[in-house]
Image (cartoon, rainbow, N blue to C red):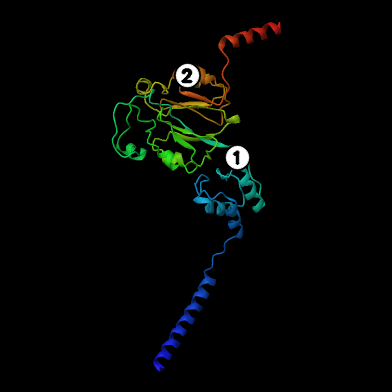
Amino acid sequence: MTLILIAVISLGAIALVSAIILYVASKKFAVYEDPRIAQVSEVLPQANCGGCGYPGCSGFADACVKAGSLEGKFCPVGGQPVMGKVAEILGLVATESEPKVAVVRCNGSCANRPRVTQYDGAMSCAIVASLYGGETACSYGCLGCGDCVAACAFDAIHMNPETGLPEVDEEKCTACGACVKACPKHIIEIRPKGKKSRRVYISCVNKDKGAIARKACTVSCIGCGKCVKTCPFEAITLQDNLAYIDPDKCKACRKCVEVCPQGSILELNFPPRKPKTEEAEVAGAAVVTEK
């Protein structure tokens, strides 16, 4: 009985000492967390997509609180309404951010880019890219396995069975950038959505010389430079046989679309163009009116 009592007292003493040590340690090494971090985190969509540039919504909330400014910080999933709530919590001003959307810069459909080989293996763009350039003669274009589709958490991108290319649903896309990271060929780009969702961009990433690029794909950019010379806003540059339109400089005049001999420049969500004969009649009428 005495031994049992001694054992109980000993264990009790050890537990008491341990509790004291843990209490002192918790006070000494306590890490203070601003309560506003939890408040900001609550209003975020908790998508944890990484589109904001931080590791999840909690990381973004922490960055917003510690920075003391919302400049350069934006939640692509929640958009401006969520950023307004974050600004209200922190007593800051939410900077306006232009809506963005994912754009597939490859128009090499099955019709435009015929197959020259056949792949028989795991349906993964990452695996195919690590083995060879793909089933077509264009080693820059879409591989068609759908890694971008699997990466999208918002069901905003799907493979078109007829063209073999991914298509983005603008209404669902949050511009989180998950599809961009998943594409080993880097054909997906986050670009400004544009006024009335109208955009002009070069749907090609082929850097081969003109003759080689044209042979591989009938709508590939051949680096002729006509679009560069035509653009009145200096929004188009030509590097490594490939033209690129700077969305910040582009005014969507669409003059480059008209002069591209390959049809590599796409115009989205614009009204139908008037026939040239009708345009000429309108111009003639205007001249007569002026006289």
Instruction: Determine which quarter of the picture holds residue 140.
Output: top left
| First in sequence: mark 1 vs mark 2 | 1
Q: How many numbered markers are drawn? A: 2
Residue at x 46% of width, y 84% of height = 12
Q: Amino acid at mark 1?
A: Ser
| 34 displayed left or right of 147 | right
Residue at x 61% of width, y 56% of height = 39
Instruction: Determine which quarter of the picture holds residue 194.
Output: top right
Residue at x 52% of width, y 69% of height = 29
Q: Position of residue 77 (x, y in %)?
A: 55, 44
| 208 displayed left or right of 286 | left
**C-beta proximity under 8 Å, tags 1 and 2:** no
Q: Residue furthest bottom?
A: 2
Residue linked to disc 2: 260
Q: Position of residue 128 (x, y in %)?
A: 32, 37
Query: What is the spatial separation of the Cα atoms under label 1 and label 2, in whole angstroms?
Result: 32 Å
The mark found on residue 265 in the picture is none
Q: Quadrant of the C terminus?
A: top right
Residue at x 35% of width, y 30% of height = 139
- Give the class, few, some or many, for how many residues have Cα within 10 Å of label 2's Cα (few <14, many ≥20): some
Q: Is 135 rendered above or below residue 87?
A: above
Give the camera-side residue of 108 and 120: 120
Residue linked to disc 1: 97
Q: Amino acid at mark 2?
A: Cys
Q: Is 174 rendered above or below residue 254?
A: below
Element at label 1: loop
Q: Residue furthest front?
A: 161
Q: Position of residue 203 (x, y in %)?
A: 46, 27
Element at label 2: loop
